Image (tube, rainbow, N blue to C red):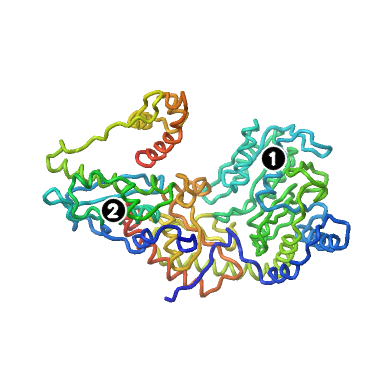
Amino acid sequence: MAKKSVYMDYNATTPLHPEVKQEMIEAFDLFGNPSSMHEPGRRARNRVERVRQLTASFLGAAPDEVVFTGGGSESNNTVIKMYTCSGCHAHCVKNERNEIITSAIEHPSVLEATQYLESNGKLVHFLPVDAAGKISIDAFREKISAKTGLVTLMLANNEIGTIQDIKTMTQIAHEYGALVHTDAVQAIGRIPVHVDDLGVDYLSFSGHKFYGPKGIGVLYSRRAKPFCRFIHGGHQEAGRRAGTTNALGIIGMGKALEMVEKEMDETIVRVKAMRDRLESGLKDRIPDILVNGHPADRLCNTLNVSFQGAEGEAILLYLDLEGIAVSTGSACSTGTLEPSHVLLATGVGPELAHGSIRFSLGRETSDEEVDYVLEAVPPIISRVRNMSTVYEGGCR
Amino acid sequence: MSSLDWVYTETVKEHFTNPKNILENEEAFHPDGRGMVGNIKCGDQMLMAIKVSDNKITDCKWKTYGCASAIASTSVLSEMVKGMTLSDAYKLRPEDVVKELGALPEHKIHCSVLGDRALRAAIDDYYTKTNQKDKIVHEEAKIICQCMNVTDKDILEAFKAGAHDYEELQFRTKIGTVCGQCKNKTLELLHEYEHLYG
């Protein structure tokens, strides 16, 4: 088996779409500051505003509801940290409600930002999830009340791909007058995302997860809903986000969204077929494995597997030596003692969390690559299990 | 070494890709002593098995559940100890293993280099089985907190009694309540005990 280079870590980041790359190369000389009144500035502004319109129509929103940010983490932080504000200007969130609802499986940029609110005196409810990574509507109903200021829940999970019923929870939250934010970073290009269908007030996403450039993201903020600035110091983004507009990033992300519109339906079908073949192939070839995440409500490209008795970092590095790039929920990859908080929240236990590998596929994944991975993984797992203190074979 | 080459040194890579002396069949190997340390909860566990003749380790095999540096450090240790006297092997410490490997990232050392402890446990097992319990060395306590005169043994005792975080440990032992300089060292020990006994 000749060594190949196989990238299966699309949930971490994606390569630029060739058309995005081309669009950005052509825009490299567009140096003008979009805030300037002169012609170079206007030229850049023109392009930025075109992307704003395109982004709005992609989300089913209005252009003035689209705020460009430095990425998903900034968008998430902006929404959550509004709840430290009490009267910055007329549209301030005013912070009169003291409770926040989120979940145990959020991205660190949501978890740590909500923990920061906790240290500021907020009561934060971290909703548990079931074995498939789903938040139960009943558990949500238990915590929501007239004291809830913000509900922030991810649309699709980065590690296991589980998709939440944001629409239903948003409807319930609105009955109590709470605002709803969803982190849709992993969802764009993988499931349809429409703000009126979801009903949310705020939504975050990031360019580099759908073949756009890094360092550029979006925060959708519904009209007439409160908004407090996170970055002060300029009038950009209608006063909602200071900092010189990242025109090149925005142009690249705009092209990426355009390509998602064009290719998404076809890509979803193709990627899902390969993901399913990888999943059944691994199950057929390797005993004692567990597929993490929801069997049906899962991103089409994500396969998270726990291999009993085998440690994830070792598996990842043996795969890397075969040219295969994946990620793991093992503690060793993070430099902490704790393995993936997402897997622990689903209740798989530390051993299976340490032994988890995430394969995330994308538009450039091919059938040959799936074959190559199916051939490479089984001997590596046998090898790691052969030297393991905890694997004796058979179902235990 | 550039980070593009690999995440660890070439020696680590060599022992990771070609681990030496894996214990494939414990019954057939029939060890004279065996020792296991570590905690699956934290992601690392090691088993060392030794054959002894004339107070020398004649053969050493191992198993490990752990990351690349855990595999490599156990593998290199199993090579180092062959032919060593029991008393010399007893003195091996993580830094000896790390030296043999070239280097390891700091945060990996106290997580993944547990082989020397497993080895001492195997030697103790051998001493126990051969009626030489008097040779088992009980490590001397080291003072960690000079101000309050708290030793590593005190910390371990408190850990085993349920003090799993720094605040709880302070409550029980008064460690670091004066100048506070020992905090990092104490946190490292807590981390290590979580691995070994958590």
Which residue is under mark 1?
A: A81
Secondary element under disc 1, as helix, strand or loop, is helix
Q: Are marks 2 and 1 on the same chain?
A: no
In this view of the protein, which residue sits in the foreground, B56 or A184?
Answer: B56
In this view of the protein, which residue sits in the foreground, A274 or B36?
Answer: B36
In the rendered view, would you say B157 is above or below A110?
A: above
In the rendered view, would you say A328 is above or below B5?
A: above
Question: In the rendered structure, the residue with mark 1 lies on which chain?
Answer: A
Give the amino acid at mark 2. Leu
In-image side of A25 versus A43 (left or right): left
Question: In the rendered structure, the residue with mark 2 lies on which chain?
Answer: B
Secondary element under disc 2, as helix, strand or loop, is helix
Q: Position of residue A45 (x, y in %)?
A: 83, 60
Give the amino acid at mark 1. Lys
Give the image quarter of residue B155. top left
Residue drawn at (17%, 45%) of the image: B126
Categorize mark 1 by other alpha carbons within 10 Å: few (<14), some (14-19), many (20+): some
Which disc number belongs to residue B77? 2
Q: CA distance from mark 2 to mark 1?
A: 50 Å
Q: Nearer the viewer, mark 2 or mark 1?
A: 2
C-beta proximity under 8 Å, tags 2 and 1: no
Q: Position of residue A102 (x, y in %)?
A: 63, 42
State the count of labels.
2
In the rendered view, would you say B140 is above or below B171?
A: below
Quadrant containing the N terminus of chain A in the rendered view? bottom left
In this view of the protein, which residue sits in the foreground, B25 or A35?
Answer: A35
In-image side of A169 versus A161 (left or right): right
Which disc number belongs to residue A219? none
Q: Position of residue A256 (x, y in %)?
A: 70, 65
Q: Position of residue A198 (x, y in %)?
A: 72, 52
Categorize mark 2 by other alpha carbons within 10 Å: few (<14), some (14-19), many (20+): many
